[in-house]
């Protein structure tokens, strides 16, 4: 006998023995069962765990049709004007369920003016353009200030920035100007490449404007936050490197340090004069950075450069830290082991590690052996005669 020929009472008896999940699957087997048991299914849900199904339909899935059926079959779905309804509304907004939020608004005859700002903030922070569009349709004032755009840029929501920035530029051009610069800064320090590229294409200056608050040059924070691609992008759009310690800052970029320093040196050859300061920055770390040190030395850093404040030399710092690789690299680059550095002591005198002592001693002897021997002169300026050889 076909299932459609069975009496409805039999299916109701079967439904009594099924759990809600099994009953839901049973209803979906054919159209006749769905029409027969849907009402029974929803009433079972309402009598059972209504809290769970509200959370599933409103927060997790945003299913307007499910919420509408729950209301139709007698479920107590809270209005957004209640505390519970407002909480469900905000949770649905976090997930971006714009249709469901609009449905809950439409259940009340009065517009939800008091909730619009809260939902707008949620939409900006979570990148839900559809939710902002829904609020705009309901009469939300889109003559906004610059802070929502800056917030969206900091979170990396390019779609929100693209949607809101034209409103700000039209309603308040000065705030739009500030929004572009502050948003660019927020995107740079939070490493959102696509937002940075979009704002630079709008002719936002990467060099800032000293007359405006917080409109600072952006190459320094880009290097400071170790983003090679954003640094390259800023240089492509005309960023000026004016910081006197930009290479020293770049040494803190972990895996990106070498690539960023290479990029800066290739684009700005005048930065080569900052290489000695790089050595001191590298040798001031808690742990040794052999690859970074070798790269900086390979680009022509002076291994005998003396710090103008303390009189330190790179070799003296490496010796004091007992870093064997750094000492060997500096000696290979031409560092003088007999050059006084810390407290007037030479690296040879500072060395405590036996291996480093051996490296420094060998280098010192090699340098002394290659020095030309000076012959003392007589008072009249003549050279002394050769000593007669003894037979």
Image (cartoon, helix red, strand yellow):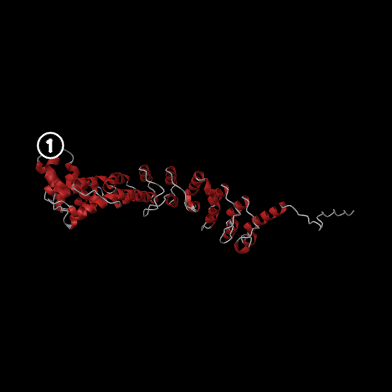
In this figure, what is the number of numbered marks?
A: 1
40 and 227: which one is in front? 227
Residue 386: horizontal and vertical position, in percent? 85, 53
Foreground residue, 325 or 69? 325
Outermost residue, right direction? 391
Observer-nearest residue: 132 or 143?
143
Viewer-side residue, 309 vs 37: 309
Identify the residue at image location x=16%, y=50%: 105
Q: Is residue 19 visible in the rendered structure shown here?
A: no
Where in the figure is residue 366, as x and y percent of width and height?
Answer: 69, 53
The residue depicted at 62 percent of the width and 62 percent of the height is 350
Quarter of the figure with the N terminus: top left
The percent coordinates of residue 259 (x first, y second) are 49, 46
Residue identified by numbered label 1: 4
**Percent of width and height locating residue 75:** 13, 51
Mark 1 crowd level (few <14, some 14–19, many ≥20, 10 Å Cα): few
Residue farthest toward the top in the current orientation of the protein: 2
Any part of residue 369 in sight: yes
Q: Secondary structure at mark 1?
A: helix
Relative placement, left or right, of 91 versus 292 is: left
Relative to 222, is 360 on the left or the right? right
């Amino acid at each position: 006998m076909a299932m459609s020929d069975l009496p409805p009472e039999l299916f109701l008896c079967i439904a009594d023995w099924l759990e809600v999940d099994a009953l839901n699957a049973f209803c979906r087997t054919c159209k006749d069962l769905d029409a027969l048991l849907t009402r029974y299914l929803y009433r079972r849900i309402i009598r059972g765990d209504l809290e769970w199904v509200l959370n599933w339909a409103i927060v997790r899935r945003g299913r307007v049709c499910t919420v509408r059926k729950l209301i139709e079959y007698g479920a107590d779905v809270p209005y957004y004007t209640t505390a519970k309804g407002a909480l469900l509304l905000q949770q649905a907004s976090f997930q971006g369920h714009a249709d469901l939020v609009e449905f809950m608004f439409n259940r009340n005859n009065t517009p939800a003016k008091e909730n619009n700002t809260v939902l707008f903030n949620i939409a900006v922070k979570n990148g839900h353009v559809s939710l902002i569009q829904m609020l705009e349709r309901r009469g939300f004032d889109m003559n906004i200030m610059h802070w929502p755009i800056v917030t969206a840029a900091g979170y990396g929501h390019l779609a929100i920035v693209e949607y809101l920035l034209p409103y700000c530029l039209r309603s308040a051009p000065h705030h739009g100007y500030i929004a572009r610069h502050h948003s660019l800064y927020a995107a740079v320090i939070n490493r959102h490449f696509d937002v940075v590229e979009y704002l630079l294409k709008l002719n936002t200056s990467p060099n800032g404007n000293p007359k405006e608050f917080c409109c600072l040059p952006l190459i320094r924070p880009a290097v400071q936050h170790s983003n090679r691609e954003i640094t390259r992008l800023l240089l492509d759009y005309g960023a000026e490197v004016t910081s006197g310690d930009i290479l020293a800052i770049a040494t803190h970029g972990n895996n990106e340090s070498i690539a960023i320093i290479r990029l800066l040196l290739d684009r700005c050859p005048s930065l080569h004069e900052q290489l000695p300061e790089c050595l001191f920055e590298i040798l001031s770390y808690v742990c040794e950075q052999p690859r970074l040190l070798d790269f900086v030395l390979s680009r022509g850093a002076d291994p005998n450069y003396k710090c103008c404040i303390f009189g330190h030399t790179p070799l003296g710092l490496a010796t004091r830290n007992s870093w064997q690789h750094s000492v060997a690299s500096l000696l290979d680059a031409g560092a003088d082991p007999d050059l006084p550095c810390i407290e007037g002591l030479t690296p040879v005198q500072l060395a405590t590690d036996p291996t480093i002592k051996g490296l420094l001693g060998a280098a010192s002897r090699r340098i002394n052996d290659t020095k030309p021997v000076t012959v003392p002169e007589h008072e009249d300026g003549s050279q002394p005669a050769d000593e007669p050889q003894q037979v």
